[in-house]
Amino acid sequence: MQRRTSVWRFVGRATALLLCLLAVTILLGYSALSMLIDRPAVSNPVVGLPPGMDVASSIPPYRGPHPRIASRPLDTYSYPIPVGDVGPHETLYAGPAQYPFYCRTEDSELGQPLVDNQHHIGIPVFKEVNGRKTAQIIGYSKDCLLPTRVGYFYNKRGTDQFFPLEDAAEDIAEIVVNGVSTEFIVRVETGTINRFIYMLAAIGSRERAESNMPGQVDTDLWNQRLVYQFRGGVGIGKVQGRLSQRGLLKRRIEQLRLGYAIAYSTANQTTNHYNIWLAEETAMRVKRQFMARYGQPKYTVGIGGSGGAIQQYLLAQNLPGLLDAAIPLYAYPDMITQTHYVFDCELLEYYFDVLASHNPRWRDWSQRSLVEGLNASDTAFSMRSLLYDIALLVRQRSPHLNSGSNECVRAWRGLTPLVNNPKYLFHTGRYSRSVLEQGHWSYWDDMKYMLGTDAQGYARQTWDNVGVQYGLGALRDERLTPEEFLHLNANIGSWKPAGKMAPERYWKLGGIGGMAGLLNFSPWGQHNMYLSPDKGNTPAKRGEGDLKAIEAAYRSGQVFLGHANIPIIDLRHYLDDALDMHHSFASFSARQRLIDGQGSADNQLIWMTRRPHDPVSDAFMLIDRWMDNIARSPSLGVAENRPDDAEDRCYDADGNLLASGPSVWDGDWNKRLHGACYRQYPPFRDSRMVAGAPTSGELFKCQRQTVSEAIDAGVYGEIEMRPYRFELQRVFPNGVCDYRLPDQGKPANLLHKGGVLVPGVLKLH
């Protein structure tokens, strides 16, 4: 018997070793491929910073008026920017220019940026001979500026592709715009405003293209409507962003066919930054450039997904009049409040994978959803999942063997260090080593002129989990035992502050030192977590959000408060079952905030469908009729001017309407019987909602009640927790969240004081 046990132990170890070798092989191959695909060699990195830059400088949190009630400084620039000239590059109120600033003009097929210094600041600019770069450096560019220029593109007949007009070979598509037949030719203007690349596009003509007047435009076929394009991504600043002229034309081909004009700036893509003031100011200036060139539009409608949707909600709130209508796709209410549950993900995954690996239930992905709220699948396949098994194997834990995944892993893994760790940067090749060593690389640092900095010069941050009872909803539903609930909350821990963080041990495997590095390999980043020193006997330290930063986030308009009185069609494909980060409950968070903020969400429609159906064109047509109604009867307001068929909807993948009407999205979020669309496309939740937080998802730092008060108030439902009172008090010595009370950090009278608007001019210093 003893010999048989030894044999099986040997077989188990051998199998684990083989699996580890297989995973290492896959990982190394994947890492090499990732480096080739995602981190191409950069021939012109940022080599130097302006003199006198102090990354540890002291910056106070913003304490001024909310953008919605503040005026903006006068823009004295004289628009339009003449062709051949450079647009304004110093901001009016959005804060100091950020350095380093990586130029992407060449990636945008617009050539090298203009030389602005000879002091090795920014990227090198090379001499060109016959349009080709030489090795001779003629100067440096720290601000990545370009002269305004004009080009013409045509749509190739029978395709959705655009090509330079000079390449046309009797293959230009014909379209009918406003009843007039014309060649599908588009005038495209590019340049830089606030250092970012802007683009204007509208129907043009061969005659205008062949004239020697690039500043002149054709307006006869413009339908007097402007589409402002926004784009998404998770960015941390310090980069100009890439413009794809042909890509944007393809993206908005249907609107161009109808005579819409298009405006865009790389400042309005959140892959590049999340400074909403900078996004707002740049969009305002780009729109002024457009109006100086083409004239006043009947209305401006925004469109864009993910971070592009966030911008629409926030700009509609913060600067009424910039957008007249919005089509947010795959929307979240804002970026900063998404960090609440996103930062929980790796804490929870490390708990399930390592700290509670003795509990077999957590190997079932669906069980994790009881705590995380987000969807899971026991059959989802991902090559990345094989790589994560290494981390389990080297910790002598059983690998998942690609048994499934969840939204935390599939969608959010890697975003916590990107946003939170100032010592992590994926695109290291864009900056020289000396520049890298001088920088703080995080979302928080990108926001430091709003949130302020601490005594060490690191940006203050808002994430907080003190008093959060993870898994409370599952406990109340008797799907988590009191013992499991207490063990989870004693061990969950938190993230270390920025000044105590170390580099990541996953995303740069090639640089962490051979086998020793492999043994430290971690997808969770647990070395940057506060964990229990004795497996929960001493509860792990929870994370304290900075109250000054939280107040500044509210005051500076980073939080969507539910004020956006324009027509809104919140549209998305249902992706919850694909474990995609663009989960459907975000639409209901935005709706709840509108109800809380302005008393009604009658100006917002929620449309949901499945791929490949795409109702964006239908949304544009409905917005147009809605805006016509408002133009005819402005005194009625936005909601009262809704067309009769402007209702919440859901479709199937073939575009068949499944249901529509005022109650189709009723459900758990508003405590009503589930409507037809809600049943068809059921939303999930996040970890904070499971812990009892409201659907709106706005709250940063909860006010707390004692454990005894929570028990007496029925926080635990039918579960008798009095026998566990002492243990609860040990795990929650500072009390537990009382979600009946408002955010500790939310300022009173944020948008008004005694019914009178608070005056003030926006300015970041």
Image (spheres, rainbow, N blue to C red):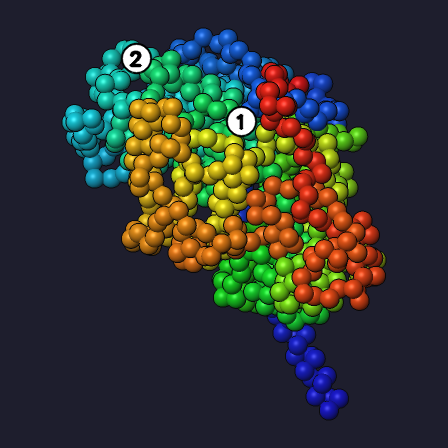
Q: CA distance from mark 1 to mark 2?
A: 33 Å
Which residue lies at the image location 70% right of the left edge and 66% below the top edge?
719
Pick whichever, 354 or 615, lies toward us.
615
Which residue lies at the image location 72% right of the left edge and 83% below the top edge?
6
Place residue 18 in its image quadrant: bottom right
Place residue 635 in its image quadrant: top left
Amino acid under label 1?
Asn
Position of residue 106 in the picture relative to residue 410 (left or right)? left
Number of marks in the rendered image: 2
Q: Which mark is residue 642?
A: none
First in residue order: circle 1 vs circle 2: 2
Residue 152 rendering spot, x and y as whole percentages: 29, 23
Pick whichever, 473 or 421, lies toward us.
473
Which residue lies at the image location 43% right of the left edge and 58% below the top edge?
679
Q: Which mark is residue 318?
A: 1
Residue 145 rendering spot, x and y as whole percentages: 50, 19
Residue 362 rendering spot, x and y as whole percentages: 63, 66
Amino acid under label 2?
Gln
SS at mark 2? loop
Place residue 369 in its image quadrant: bottom right
Can you tell which of label 1 and label 2 is closer to the viewer? 1
Q: Which residue is mark 2?
A: 216
Which residue lies at the image location 63% right of the left edge and 45% below the top edge?
340
Task: Mark yes or no: residue 244 visible.
Answer: no
